[in-house]
Amino acid sequence: MDTAGRVDFFLDLMSCCNDVAYWCFDDQFALVSTNGKTNEAFLRAFIIDEKRSDQLLLHGAKEGAPLVSSMPLGIEWACVFEKSENQRMRIHIIGPLFLSDVSTRQIETYVGGLPLSPQKQRMIITELTKLPVLPATQFFPYVQMLHYCVTGNKLPFSDILHESVP
């Protein structure tokens, strides 16, 4: 089974239990595929903007381990990097999601403090309230499984890299 087949099988299995967004981008950060669980405009405006996508591409070029990114409110997503012999790369992302319940009021307070237009704030609040809640005890094994599906390599939990994004 090729990488795409393994990832599709993983996504089918994951969807049996959780409604988590999946994204695949190429090395120009053009969208290759998604399961459509999250609005792409939201993802590009709030989670992975142009600066962030450049940072992820640099990280993926240097590192082989998955990268889990955390934002305020407990918003998380994970990137798994697929590299080929010709140095082309794909970035597989699961998330964004919350690791624990967050109230609409908490979301509104957080987003209200961001320097964004009211229209963009409403869009972000709407999208954040749709994010699934997935405990870390489920999320991190999914990251390990996606990494295995993409690379064929097993890795211990301790090898997953973690960063905080302001």
Image: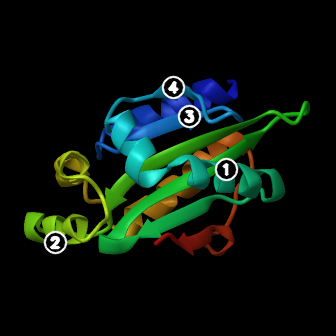
Mark 3: give few (<14), some (14-19) or many (20+) Cα within 10 Å. Answer: many
What residue is shown with label 3? 24
What residue is shown with label 2? 109
Work out how far the residue at label 3 is from the one at label 2, CA to CA, in angstroms.
31 Å
Amino acid of disc 1: Asp
Q: Which sits in the foreground, 115 or 92?
A: 115
Seen at 69% across and 62% down, the residue is 155
Label 1's element? helix
x and y, in percent, of residue 163 in the image: 57, 72
Sequence-first tag of 4 and 2: 4
Residue 162 shows up from this direction: yes
Left or right, 7 with respect to 137, comes to: right
Work out how far the residue at label 4 is from the one at label 3, CA to CA, in angstroms.
5 Å
In this rendering, the label closer to the viewer, 1 or 4 = 1
In this rendering, the label closer to the viewer, 3 or 2 = 2
Amino acid of disc 2: Thr
x and y, in percent, of residue 62 in the image: 82, 58
Label 2's element? helix
Amino acid of disc 3: Cys
What residue is shown with label 1? 54
What residue is shown with label 4? 33
Sequence-first tag of 1 and 4: 4
Left or right, 126 with respect to 3, comes to: left
Label 3's element? strand
